[in-house]
Amino acid sequence: MKVKLKNLATIQMGYSFRSRLEVSPGGDVAVIQMKDLLSNNTVDCCHLMKIDMEVVKNHHLVRKRDLVFRSRGQITTSAVILEAPGKAVVAAPLLRIRVTAIERILPEYLNWYINQREAQIFLTSKADGTTQKMISKQTVENLEVSLPPLEQQKSIVELALLSSQEQTVLRALTEKRKQYVETILMKLTKGLVGSKLPARPCNRGIKA
């Protein structure tokens, strides 16, 4: 079953600041910007810019498990807030997505789904602009989301996280091996080691 996103969540434009943001040592409002959205599709709430805002309406404040959507640029993915951000707002052109049908969909699953190929194809097909893509609020609202049972959603999120962690470890191992081989090769150029190169791993037992 597929349900339009607007029937599962509210989508709100980020706060539009009239002037350039400047850090305030005594600022009491944190601002989530594009740079705070990490490559693992979560929001870094530890290094948010703090500013002074005289009036902040409650509907502008974000909460834990809200999603932040990149509505402009070549990357049109979302990120989920996994930690309580305190008193914080989302800056335009980002969009805030808040699940309202919590009995039907997990915010973490929605975040995963938006970042999958099927959803991305829909979003980019509706994008305006050529040099810089722009996804409208209406387009996000009309995204159709597949809705498996909640338990299955939870399993999907957990498996996706494990897969992501595995890829991180594999990338780290690849980089370590690259550094090791480069060190050996540099020593060879200086005659510091014998002429025999380190054996190439046979990857025995690993199948494609």
Image (cartoon, grey):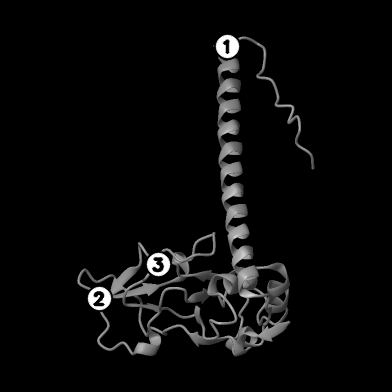
Q: Residue at x 73, y 31 (%)?
A: 203
The alpha-carbon separation of the residues under discs 1 and 3 comes to 51 Å
What percent of the width, then of the height, locates residue 13? Answer: 49, 86
Is 32 in front, or is 111?
111
Q: How crowded is mark 3: few (under 14 residues within 10 Å), some or many (20 or more)?
A: some
Mark 2 lies on a secondary structure that is loop
Q: Which residue is drawn at 42% across and 63% down?
A: 44
Q: How crowded is mark 2: few (under 14 residues within 10 Å), some or many (20 or more)?
A: some
Question: Which image quarter: residue 48?
Answer: bottom left
What percent of the width, then of the height, locates residue 23? Answer: 28, 70
What percent of the width, then of the height, locates residue 36? Answer: 44, 65
Rendered position, 79 above or below 161: below
Is 55 in front, or is 187?
55
Q: In this view, does 74 lie to the left or right of 202?
A: left
Question: Which image quarter: residue 184?
Answer: top right
Q: Is tag 2's residue or tag 3's residue first in the polypeptide sequence?
A: 2
The alpha-carbon separation of the residues under discs 2 and 3 comes to 17 Å
Q: Which of marks 2 and 3 is in front?
A: 3
Q: Residue at x 41, y 84 (%)?
A: 15
The residue furthest left is 26
Q: What residue sits right under mark 3 in the picture?
A: 83
Q: What residue sits right under mark 2 in the picture?
A: 28
Q: Which of marks 1 and 3 is in front?
A: 3
What's the residue type where badge 3 is placed?
Glu
What percent of the width, then of the height, locates residue 143? Answer: 67, 83
Mark 3 lies on a secondary structure that is loop
What's the residue type where badge 1 is placed?
Val
Q: Disc number at residue 193?
A: 1
Rendered position, 63 above or below 75: below
Mark 1 lies on a secondary structure that is loop
